[in-house]
Amino acid sequence: MRSFHGLHATCLALSVLTTPMMADAQTPSGVLGEEASRALDRQLTEIARTNRLPSVAVEVTIPGHAPYRFVTGAAEIGGADRQFDQPFRIASLTKTFVATAVLLLVDRGRLSVDMALSTWFPAFPNAKLITVDDLLRMRSGIAAPDDEQAGRAVYDQPLAPAPGLEQRMAEANRLQNQFRLPNEVGVYTNLNYDILGGIVERVSGQPLSRFIVENIILPMRLDQTSYPGVVDLPGGLHGYGLKQETGDFEDKTRLNPGLAGPAGAMTSSLGDLGRYVRALCTGALLRPATQAARMKGQVLEGTSTEYGQGLITGPAGCGHTGSIAGFNTDMYFFPDLDAAVIVSVSRLDRDDRPQSAPVLQAVYTALRSRASR
């Protein structure tokens, strides 16, 4: 849910390694080769140890090659080992599903990205000026309540009652003197996607969760992906946060998903996300013109991160980062390598510092090194 800092840190980590290289199409073994895979295994094991990560799981897939898979650590501290296929909370990766839901409605002629927010919420500040496209691209100008503060509140009280969309919008309404004009600057704000979730529900006549299940999850056979309505995480994996004052871990697994909502409620697995991000970034889910528009990113204020319609776009790759109490996830597709990379770490502390960034950096470096040989 609170993914801006993790998102930006991830992009900074990847931006130093963007020289295009072609993958070796003649390699019959795994995506990295046996020696490089063993070296990366050792490196990731050491990262997990030195950074006190309860568990780390990675998948790298390139068509025609055996995938690279790595898992270390415990599903529950003091308990069984983590397994590759255990679901986890994907936080802001949820935004890619919500944006896809919006764009599916566009492709079906039921919605236009040029439609004004006033179509559904006429009393909201600047509603006649803000478009669906502005919301998708984080360029609405809405001055939402502090996402970091909200994230800390979720961390501290993960089972608290969730405010509805009207309450979230009312809180933003009180900040209307801080609004900017739409499409002037990109500012990453969860409320944009809370509102988009509400628009999907009004246009489709279905709960957002059902629309995503019926139109994305089931058609793609993402069997371990869900938009949950319960506080427990299926599969037995636990997420943790480190208490800085004591140095002890606290279990942050249980969460009221309504607190994250359309900005971050969903759960998934490495295998599902690997297939999904490839489809997401290559245009398999949308019409070509819709996909082309989606991939046109614009820089978010104060960063080097380019954001399109619900996903990070070039030059390093396409995808998203997500962080929520206990879990940190990176999901990226690198077109020049034809590689999908998923990283899941079962730790996210109250400070929201991205725990998965060094893991992703190591995997990305190994991929580039292999491709250059």
Image: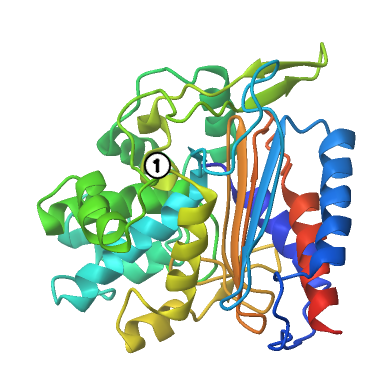
Q: SS at mark 1? A: helix
Quadrant of res 22: bottom right
- The colour style of the image is rainbow
Give percent across and percent down for residue 61. Answer: 60, 67
188 or 237, which is in the foreground? 237
Decide which of 48, 315 is in the foreground and name it: 48
89 with respect to 34 (left or right) = left
Occupied quadrant, residue 221 = bottom left
Residue 34: image location, x then y, percent:
81, 65
Depth order, front residue of 243/283: 283
Pointer 1: what residue? 172
Q: What is the tally of numbered marks visible in this picture?
A: 1
Which amino acid, mark 1? Ala
* Nearer to the camera, 42 or 108: 42
| Residue 124 visible here | no
For residue 256, above or below residue 371: above
Which quarter shows the C terminus?
bottom right
Query: Above or below — where is 76 with respect to 298?
Result: above
